[in-house]
Image: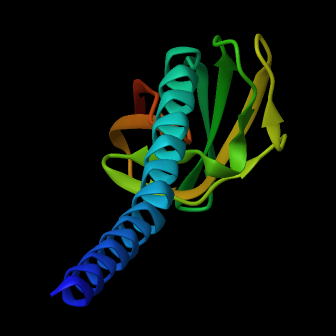
């Protein structure tokens, strides 16, 4: 009877240690990943608060039967924005564009050009930064 009690205690002890090791080996990486995700979320929230743009001017030029739109944007926020990650929506449709600079620093301007926009009429323009901050502008093409 004495040996079976010691054997049972050893089996239970080893099982408990194995269970603790399994729980710890899966829990610690999960906690680390959650902590990293919260850090990234906090950084994105701070970047959104510090981001602001203003569409200061929109001009159009006739290009055959279409129009080329030139958009001047000022970075009124406090962080540098990468223009390659901007989106330009015209009447709800995403458009390809070219830009005068790769980055727009705070209190500086950048010029976007959208080519071959068809048709006259009311144009609703929306420019969206890489972190979701946007500005709107309405104008009429002749």
In the rendered structure, the answer to whether residue 33 lies left or right of residue 100 reads: left
Number of numbered tags placed on the structure image: 0
The answer to whether one can see residue 60 in this image is yes
In the rendered structure, the answer to whether residue 15 lies left or right of residue 83 reads: left
Q: Residue 135's x, y, as percent?
A: 45, 24
Q: Quadrant of the N terminus?
A: bottom left
Q: Quadrant of the C terminus?
A: top left
How did the renderer colour the structure?
rainbow
> Residue 84 or 25: which is nearer the viewer?
25
The residue positioned 50% from the left and 60% from the top of the image is 29
The answer to whether one can see residue 118 in this image is no
> Residue 24 or 10: which is nearer the viewer?
10
Please, is residue 105 above or below residue 61 in the view?
A: above
The residue positioned 47% from the left and 26% from the top of the image is 45
Please, is residue 64 above or below residue 52 in the view?
A: below
The residue positioned 57% from the left and 20% from the top of the image is 51
In the rendered structure, the answer to whether residue 65 lies left or right of residue 111 reads: left
Q: Residue 68's x, y, as percent?
A: 62, 49
The residue positioned 84% from the left and 40% from the top of the image is 101
Please, is residue 26 above or below residue 52 in the view?
A: below
Quarter-of-image position of residue 103: top right
Q: Residue 82's x, y, as percent?
A: 73, 41
In the rendered structure, the answer to whether residue 113 lies left or right of residue 35 reads: right
Q: Residue 2's x, y, as percent?
A: 22, 83
- The residue most toward the left is 1
- The residue most toward the right is 101
């Amino acid at each position: 009877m004495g040996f079976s009690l010691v054997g049972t205690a050893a089996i239970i002890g080893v099982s408990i240690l194995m269970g603790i090791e399994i729980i710890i080996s899966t829990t610690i990486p999960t906690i680390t990943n959650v902590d990293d995700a919260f850090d990234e979320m906090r950084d994105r929230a701070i970047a959104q608060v510090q981001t602001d743009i203003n569409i200061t001017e929109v001009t159009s030029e006739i290009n055959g039967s279409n129009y080329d739109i030139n958009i001047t944007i000022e970075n009124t926020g406090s962080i540098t924005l990468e223009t390659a990650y901007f989106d330009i929506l015209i009447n709800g449709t995403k458009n390809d564009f070219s830009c005068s600079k790769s980055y727009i620093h705070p209190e500086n301007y950048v010029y976007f050009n959208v080519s071959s926009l068809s048709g006259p009429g009311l144009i609703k323009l929306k420019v969206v930064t890489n972190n979701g901050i946007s500005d709107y502008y309405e104008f009429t093409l002749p």
